[in-house]
Image (spheres, rainbow, N blue to C red):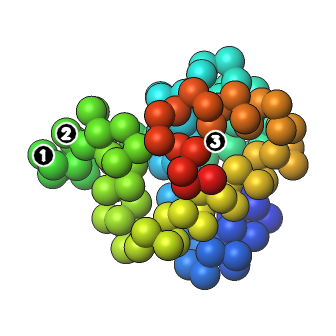
Amino acid sequence: MSEIVTRIADNVGIAPDVAEKALGMMLGFLQREGDDGAVARMIEAMPGAPELVARYNGEGKSGGLLGGLMSAIGGGIMGLGQQLMSLGLGMGEITSLARETMAVAREHAGDEVVDKVVASVPGLSQFV
């Protein structure tokens, strides 16, 4: 996973620790919101992704802020955006992060699986 995190960090222009946390949060969001089978195949295909999801999946819910909790529970893609902004990311970086994540996922899981994941999450297609 460190190669993937480094690649995403470099291509998005963010620190590796922020990229790692953001990637884990994004994959955790997809796990909660997307097509179960397709997301599971995508995450399993990406080296180190299951561990990253396990580490950061609940990150947006554990921050202690009521607003963060509410957005994580019911905010969909906007809730994820708020969580990522709390890491200091701007909209351009979030869009780049989403595109890079899906590019990596396509390399490991294939277009068909990733297309199914993207189609299953309302609003995601506008970012990737």
Percent x, y for residue 111? 83, 38
- Which numbered disc flags the more N-terminal residue, 3 or 1? 3
In the image, is 61 to the left or to the right of 46? left
Nearer to the camera, 2 or 105: 105
Nearer to the camera, 34 or 55: 34
Q: Amino acid at mark 2?
A: Met
- In the displayed structure, 54 sits above or below 90; it is above
Question: Residue 3's image quarter?
Answer: bottom right
Percent x, y for residue 39? 65, 29
Specify the label residue 70 is tagged with: 2
The residue where tag 1 is placed is 66
- Mark 1 Cα within 10 Å, few/some/many (few <14, many 20+)? few
- In the displayed structure, 39 sits above or below 75; it is above
Question: Residue 100's image quarter?
Answer: bottom right
Nearer to the camera, 127 or 61: 127
The residue where tag 3 is placed is 51
Determine whether label 1 and label 2 are within 8 Å by CB.
Answer: yes
Determine whether the residue tagged by mark 1 lies in a helix, strand or loop: helix
Percent x, y for residue 114? 73, 37
Spatial CA span between label 3 and label 1: 27 Å
